Image: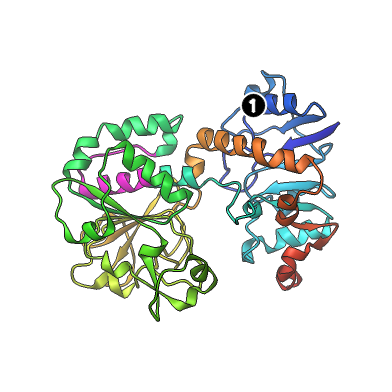
Amino acid sequence: MLKLGLIREYKLPADRRVAFTPSQCVELQKRFPDLQIIVESSPDRIFTDVDYTSLGIRVQENITECDILMGIKEVPAYKLIAGKTYLFFSHTIKKQEHNRQMLQEILKQNIRLIDYECLHWPNGARVLGFGKYAGWVGAYEAFKAFGLRSKAYNLQPAYTFPNFDSVKKSLLEYKSTILDLKLRIVVSGSGRVSSGSEDVLHFLEIPKVSPADFIKTKYSQTVYTLLDTFDLYERKTGGAWDHDHFFKNHKDYKSLFDRYIYHTDILINGVFWDKDMPRHFTKEDTALPGFSIQTIADISCDIDGSVPITLRDTSMNEPVMGWDPLNQCECEPYKQGCIDIMAVSNLPSEIPADASEGFGNDLMKEVIPALLGNNSLMIDQATICRNGQLTPYYQYLQDYVNT
């Protein structure tokens, strides 16, 4: 009997998400009779211990008997159990400094680490992710922040609701107000995050217009446009758009976002970004006469990244910080003449029930069969280390763990 443990989230602030809901645990054990699921007791999880035990799932304090341990966020080094297989978002593949010690300990304890972020289909697309849920909450937070700024309406924080259906119902109360404000909204990106953001805009029946019309046309109600990768960047030397070339040669491209900084009230940013990519604008651009962006929901939340005035992560309790264009520094939010930035890095944890259910469904359908089977290339390529050694795919991390 193979034992799979759902670990408690120990990273602070505690994340309320879980890899599998109680009903999904029951379904998993039906599909895989040789698999037993044990849940580590947690006071923080969105689904209580009783939710699991009432369906016959074992809950206990000690899960060292489990062969496979699954969580969501990074596991503190002192909580790791030697010789096990772990699956979670490790946030180590970009050599993140704050997780160096954890990966060093994982290697020391001969742990097999499979990173959710590294599970890919043959075409390179990610198998798992919370991007859609981040997009949902990020768009809601954009409207919440603008409501506080404009004093036109007042929305409750998303985390105060039991699920996202309830969040949307609260937003629906202000639909006519939002449409009448004649806002001009840009959604940037082409993945799950931007798709999730568009779900919210469609729910409010905000018309979608082309990027060209967004710039040149005046509208009598709130509208939005979606900027895909080819709308955001162009090759410095000119020429037709080449998707593959762009992702292999970021340094050869420049940003086209300056076309929109004079026409946008709200930016919902969901782009993938790395250090070689051009930013949407510069800090200095924010002081230009006519720079019109008032509220930014930076869902991507790359510090000094595509949105250079994202200076730090914000929190669920204080989700918005301000940027003073004149003095080029952070300030209190909602001040006249300043820009508000929402930069919560763990937005899906604000709707933990929805996010857990969706993530668990994908895990159950796509990952567990591969994990329990033999010779899965997908699993192999997502395995960062085993038996105390980095796997061939992640040898580039050797200097990171040797430091």
- In this image, 111 relative to 288: left or right? right
> Circle 1: is it few (<14), some (14-19), or many (20+) Cα within 10 Å?
many
- In this image, 235 relative to 57: left or right? left
Residue 117: where, in percent of width, then height?
A: 62, 53
Image point 65% across, 49% down: which residue? Answer: 116
Q: Residue 9 magenta-drawn?
A: no
Q: Is residue 144 above or below residue 314?
A: above
Image point 45% across, 52% down: which residue? Answer: 344
Q: Is residue 358 above or below residue 345?
A: above
Residue topped by disc 1:
22
Scheme of colours in the image: rainbow
Image point 77% across, 36% down: which residue? Answer: 4
Q: How many marks?
A: 1
Q: Which residues are magenta?
A: 139-157
Q: Residue furthest bottom?
A: 237
* Amino acid at the residue labelled 1: Pro
Residue 326: where, in percent of width, then height?
A: 25, 72
For the N terminus, the image quarter is: top right
Magenta residues, dominant SS class: helix
Q: Nearer the viewer, residue 164 or 190?
A: 190
Q: Nearer the viewer, residue 121 or 286?
A: 121
